[in-house]
Amino acid sequence: MKILVAIKQVPERDAQIRVGADGRSIDENDAAWTINEPDAYALEEALQLKEREGVGEVVVVCAGPERAASTLREALAKGADRAIHIVTEDEGAESLSARDTLGVAALLADAAKGESPDLILTGLQSDDLGAGQTGVVLAELLGMPHATLIMHVERTATGLKVKRELEDGWFQHVEMPLPALLTIQSGGNRLRYATLMGIKKAKSKETRTVDAGAATAAVAEIVKVYPPERVKRTEMLTGSADEIAAKIVEKLKFEVKVL
Amino acid sequence: MSGVLVVLEQKSGSWNRMSFEALAAGQKLAADLGVACSAAVVGAAESIASLAQELADKKLETVWAVGHPLLARYTADGWCGALQQLIAEAKPQYVVLPHTYQVRDFAPALATRLKQVLISDVTAIHDGPIFVRQWMQGKLNADYRHSSEGVCFVSVQAGTFRADAVEAGSAEVKSFAPQLDAAQIRTTPGEPFREAAQTVDLTAAPVIVSVGRGIGEQDNLAIVEELAQALGAELAASRPICDNGWLPMERQVGSSGQTVAPKLYLAVGISGAIQHLVGMKGAKTIIAINKDPDAPIFEIADIGVVGDLFEIVPALTKAIKQ
């Protein structure tokens, strides 16, 4: 089975985030970058599927500027066989952030068409923009059936049987033919680390670069980005650890009344 | 094209509780724009008839009962096919949906069919209309505008609009029978199920100590367990802790876990992604300890401590025991 995994490079979770100079983006200057965590789960599911079957190929694809190459290298070091980098401009009208979900999914769809994969996996959403749509839009553009929030994937005689997460602790199984697209929920697997051997092997693996085409006008246009206002007045406690602890105990006794 | 169409969600003849939050959002958007608001409910005709009737006393132009035997169970293909036809018939300018797991599954595909993009998980709607979304797990807000002639799809975040703000009035209930063919529906859904019976009922706990990613590694959990013990609290966690297998899934609070409203919720090393906040923001008092002053958990905390949990948590445990 040939599995295509669409991954995104996002700012690191603990990174200090500032608004970009244009007021409509994230300031990339002092950001550190990593693989979008839900996409890491998608990659893990793909690698385990291939390992279970003993045959097949895992191809990772990422749209983004030059810096995204490091995230693809990491995926190769974890065990992906090949990589495709759809290179976008760093900034401006042709950058990744100037394209809306439909624009980004169209880039991925073009790359996917050339590969004719049996299965496409991606994370259920990105940690930066959180729209949670790229996978579903990609499936629609490619005319494939899809299922979202998938915890487990099983091959059947006719296609796939997947375990889909519903709200409030419920699940359901969904069956579908191949080719298909799944968006992967975290927690179905444990993530692996790249081994030294994996990092070494990655150096000889192929990364194909393709230029992203011109961006089409975004349907959903970003007007302004800004830090949220504090809605609720939070009483911030300061001091040494012992002083803070004493203040909290005071509140637990006399205000919250749980002690 | 004019007006607002709200797509409500039901399962086996019961409303999803977020449906009426979306309805309130749709009514407000329609009022701001000076246009009519309508609603749609999708399913097998016999199971949605009474639900549609329940909406007859709301301030709506039309209630569309979108019924077909192939809609008895949710599938993305069935819902996309039915709603695409309803949109062609009702010609709304805006389609408003609750941002549920089901909506996340079909609405992006439906929008794509109409060459649109769903503006998802919206937390506010301002004049314009401008739709506010969260970036970076709530660290930033982003204002979006729909800049196309076509229909604008918007899904609203849980808890953003109040279900009790739905305006009463009267509505005409109409049946709409879409043309669907079994061959169009490519996926076969199974019955919903739960994993082994839950043995931990966090919803009954008056005091909860909850731990997140900030704890770093499994061995560090002991300090939080000791704090929970000293407080007589149940121990809970955000999703990443359960994903890692450090605590069982049944201790997870959030959209995919339990929804709690204790007297005290003490969040340790939890940044406060929306998926977690929806599960605990009903707590009477929220205390948050986090090293990141910009963590969204401080948006909703009553009492906040910016600092090193590895110093503060043991100090707090000691102080409680004294």
Image (cartoon, coloured by chain):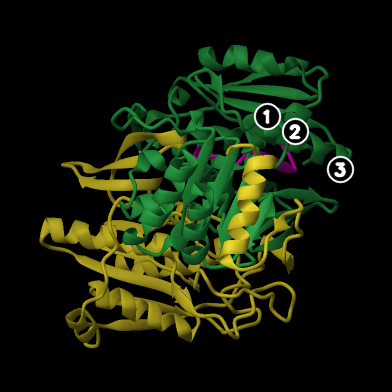
The chain letter for the residue carrying disc 3 is: B
> At which x and y percent is residue B119?
65, 52
The number of discs equals 3
Say what amino acid the circle numbered 3 marks: Leu
The answer to which of marks 1 and 3 sits earlier in the sequence is 1
Which residue is drawn at the image coordinates 62% and 83% (left, top)? Answer: A91
> Looking at the image, do the residues carrying marks 2 and 3 touch, with CB atoms under 8 Å apart?
no
In contact (CB < 8 Å): disc 1 and disc 3: no
Q: Secondary structure at mark 3?
A: helix
Viewer can see residue A191: yes
Q: Are dots 2 and 1 in contact, CB under 8 Å?
A: yes
For mark 2, name the chain.
B
Mark number, residue B33: 3
Mark 2–mark 3 Cα distance, whole angstroms, equals 14 Å
Q: Is residue B228 left or right of B127 when viewed as pictured?
A: left
| Disc 2: which residue | B24
Q: Are marks 1 and 3 on the same chain?
A: yes
Q: Secondary structure at mark 2?
A: helix
Alpha carbon distance from label 1 to label 3: 20 Å
What hue does chain B carry in this figure?
green
Q: Is residue B62 above or below residue A259?
A: above
Q: Looking at the rendering, which quadrant does residue B289 occupy?
A: bottom right
Residue type indicated by callout 1? Phe
Residue range in magenta is: B91-102
Classify 10 Å Cα crowding around label 2: few (below 14), some (14-19), many (20 and above): many
Which of labels 1 and 3 is toward the front?
A: 1
Does dot 1 land on a helix, a strand or a loop? helix
